[in-house]
Each structure stands twice: as C-alpha cells, then as structure tokens.
Image: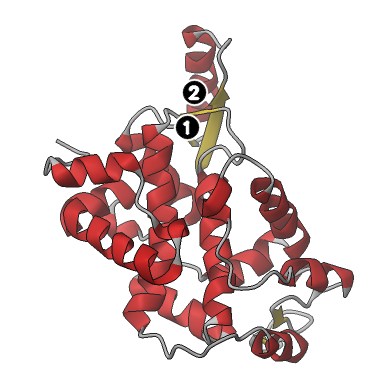
Amino acid sequence: NMKLLEIIKHEGTAEHVAAAAVEVGLKQGKLPIVVGDVPGFYVNRCLGPLMVETTALISHGVGIEQLDKEILKYGMPVGPITLVDEVGIDVANHVREFLSNADMGVRMQGGGTDVNVLGEMVEKGFLGKKSGKGFFVYPEGKGKGKKTVNPEVAARAKELVTEDMKLSPDEIRNRLLSRFVNEAVLCLQDGVLENPHDGDIGAVFGCGFLPYTGGPFRMLDAHGIDKYCDMMSGFADKYGAQFEPCQLMKDMARENKKFHK
C-alpha cells in the first residue's frame, strides 16, 4: 500500500487549489507531492527508463531471477521483475508504450532488443500475479509454496541475449538505478518537481527507491554528484546516449553543489 499521492498541477491550477488537494491527501494519511502535468507524472516517468534498462540487461545476459536478486541485495524492497508482475504485465506494457510514444526520446530507448517482451506475454495471457503467471508462476491458494520462474518466459529471455557480457553485480545495479536517478534529476530540471525534497519522498514512498539512502537526491549528495556523473558518462560511451547525464546533473557536478543544503 503506497503512501505517496501525486497531485498533478497544470498551468491553470491556482495555488490555493493545489494546497487544498494536498490538505485532502494529508487527511487521508497520504504523503502528497505536487508535480507537473507531463507523461508519467513523476514516479512512472522515472520507472519507464528503468524498465527499458531491465530489457537491455536481459539482452546482455542477466537472468530474470538475478535481476531481482541484485536489486534486493542493494536495499530495494522489491526487484524490477517482481514489481512488473505485481503491477500487472498488461498495465506495465501500456505504460511502456505510452512513455515510448511521449516526449522522452532516447531515454525510453536502448532496450537491447526491438522485441516487445511484455506485449508477447500479454498475448499469452501471462498478466502477472493476478493471472497466476507472469515472469513468475504463482502457486494457487495460500501457503502453497514459493513462486518460481515461468519456464516459457525464461526460455524466451535466453533467445533475446545478444551478448553475455558477464556483468558484475555493481554494473547491473548501477545501470538500472542510474536510469531512474537521471530521470528524477531531469524532472527537477524541467520543473516537474518543485524541489529535491519532493523528489526524494516521491521515489521512496512511490516505488520503494533505496529507503536507507533517503531518496535519489540525498543519495547523489552522499555519493558525490561528480562521481555519479562520471559513471553515467562512462555508461554513455559504452552503451549509448540513453545514459547521458542530464544538464542539471552536469552543472551540479561541475559547480560542486549539493541538492540539499
């Protein structure tokens, strides 16, 4: 049960209307943030590139279970594969298609394959947890054992491997999460977010982004924005423009600034 509530403000929204919506959210026990009216709003906009990167990692030889495992070890409460299964493959596919045709350009590209894996799964009726089969197969009834990898999907994932890069756990995690983090900073740069604080709250309470870091902006401050920028530039040289750090991240790195004073 996610506590986050995104209040969408467009050009014509009066301040007192946005404030009233926040007040209602607080009374409901939610954590409201005010965000701009763009495709995906804030959290889904950041998750889009991360989902594309999930496919890219599969094409570079990372197994379905391994993807979840490496992210869980890093401190995320749920892995990207399990997240898609729980949201619903059909819903995730719709979001992916919507964002791919929106205003995000190269950031929704670089998936390593032109195959729409989610679309194929929907056609087969693999809709995730709600249908009993997605990336995982879910045993029926309570206490019937653990979920297991769906053999059909695992076999299809192996067919999509273009090159087994034998990636290290660090590279897997950093490739996945940097796509999310860069998009979060871009949301601040473009005024989708009002401040870094909202971006941290949104990411932690909207999709469980590394809670121990306090959110992507606090994580960048602690890690060193310059070091993170260099890492992403290295990925951009190796894998393509989808990893290019956004202008605000580059500016903050160059001026040695922090998001939180």
Q: In the visual, does 83 lie left or right of 244? A: right
Q: Residue at x 41, y 76 (%)?
A: 172
Q: Earlier in the sequence, mark 1 or mark 2?
A: 2
State the image quarter where residue 174 is shown: bottom left
* Circle on res. 32: 1
Any part of residue 131 in sight: no
Q: Amino acid at mark 2?
A: Val
Residue 196 at what x, y percent from top left? 31, 37
Choose between 23 and 199: the one closer to the eye. 199
Disc 1/disc 2 C-alpha distance (Å):
6 Å
Q: How many marks?
A: 2
**Disc 1 and disc 2 in contact, CB within 8 angstroms:** yes
> Which mark identifies residue 22?
2
Looking at the picture, tell me which residue is in the foreground, 145 or 227. Answer: 227
User: Is 137 left or right of 181, judged from the image as shown?
Assistant: right
Residue 166 visible, this orientation? yes
